[in-house]
Image (cartoon, rainbow, N blue to C red):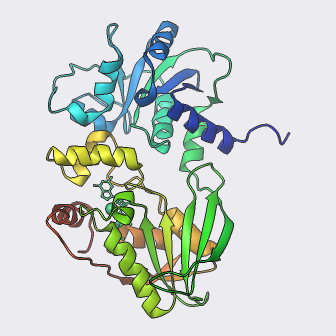
Amino acid sequence: MSLIPTLAETVSRARADLRMGLPVMIGGHLAAAVETLSSARLEDMRRLGRPVLAITQRRAETLKARAYDDGLARVQVPQDADLPWLRALADPANDLRTPMKGPLFTDRDGDPTPHMAALALAKSAQLLPAVLVVPAHAPAGLTVLAPGQVLAQLAGEAALAPVAAARLPLLSAEHSRLHIFRPDDGAAEHYAIEIGDPPRDQPVLARLHSACFTGDVLGSLKCDCGPQLHAALDAMGQAGAGVLLYLNQEGRGIGLANKMRAYDLQNQGFDTVEANHRLGFEDDERDFRIGAALLKRMGFAQARLMTNNPRKVAMMENHGIEVTQRVPLITPRNRFNTGYLDTKAEKSGHLL
Ligand SMILES: Nc1nc2c(ncn2[C@@H]2O[C@H](COP(=O)(O)OP(=O)(O)OP(=O)(O)O)[C@@H](O)[C@H]2O)c(=O)[nH]1
Ligand SMILES: [Zn+2]
């Protein structure tokens, strides 16, 4: 029956539910993102069973909570814990001002897969990875999923379909086209800027650019994204051909709201990697398979990739695009971005 939602559609719906503050049912458990949970819903969930707060191992390390499962800690929620208590565990903004939240006790027994699936879903919704989980029967109207299904769907690769394309003269190159691609999993669209008419049977000068609202649009001095974007387009314009993929993976995949949380932590003295970890994220949550898939979709098999990030080269090679050359993309330093660039070189292996 084609009118019944597919797994991809149900997961997409669940993502939207969490963002709105609505719990979803995962493997016989109610799961609600702490970031969007209301106190009324917290009370109702608490009445149904024993609540556990699922956080990532990264966040657990900062909170000194034991993580017994791979990448996950299941924190026991005390009887008197209220919404501010949950929020303080979810959000590191006030960690330094109010360091003592514990002692925190964590679960070791029982099946952790509903909690793992709930965290993966919160991350994919670009919410803080902190989810209240309560064993319960499904109240009517909530989205219902099996944990294995959620994990498999989120680990899978979305199919990207071309939606629209048009000629778009640019300052860097008058002969350019903008292509829009839409994934079939309800996630963000991605763009390809095709400069000139790059021959499909030769290595294309290519750049995988991850969205950076602050750098690309506002001209932020904290990172190198804006200058890199324009340097790449200029180089393609000068070469007469190239493809810049503009991937909507703001903040290395954590979303703009979380990136601003990370910036706030950076203002408290943490570097870009530490800030991501304190929020409960990995250093880099991007899915680089999308870049390879888009280039293949556009008919390319080989690229001269403009990047300083060896991981991008490796990911392209592992997903069917041969990188015949890595073209460095070095942009000027200033007093606001120099620490960020040093951290990228020291901790993320960038060749700067
Ligand atoms: N989480 C987080 N994301 C950031 C920070 N600064 C910049 N970003 C994001 O980092 C991404 C930068 O991506 P890219 O420039 O494509 O990638 P890169 O890994 O630096 O590699 P190359 O530029 O290709 O060498 C963008 O999505 C930015 O929004 C930060 O401090 N924290
Ligand atoms: Zn940036």
Q: Residue at x 29, y 36 (%)?
A: 59
Whether 3 is drawn above or below 348: the answer is above
Q: Picture coordinates of residue 4 (x, y %)?
A: 79, 37
Q: Is residue 264 left or right of residue 75?
A: left
Does any portion of residue 68 appear in the rendered image? yes
Q: Is residue 302 left or right of residue 72?
A: right
Q: Is residue 61 left or right of residue 114?
A: left
Ligand 1 positioned in quadrant: bottom left
Q: Picture coordinates of residue 146 (x, y %)?
A: 61, 31
Q: So how many labels did they put on this image?
A: 0
Question: Foreground: 101 or 108?
Answer: 101
Question: Foreground: 308 or 125?
Answer: 125
Whether 69 is drawn above or below 7: the answer is above
Q: Quadrant of the C terminus?
A: bottom left
Does any portion of residue 106 appear in the rendered image? no
Quadrant assignment, res 136 = top right
Whether 240 is drawn above or below 40: the answer is below
Question: Foreground: 152 or 339?
Answer: 339
- Which residue is farthest right? 1
Q: Residue at x 55, y 26 (%)?
A: 22
Q: Picture coordinates of residue 282 (x, y %)?
A: 34, 48
Q: Is residue 70 left or right of residue 290?
A: left
Q: Quadrant of the N terminus?
A: top right
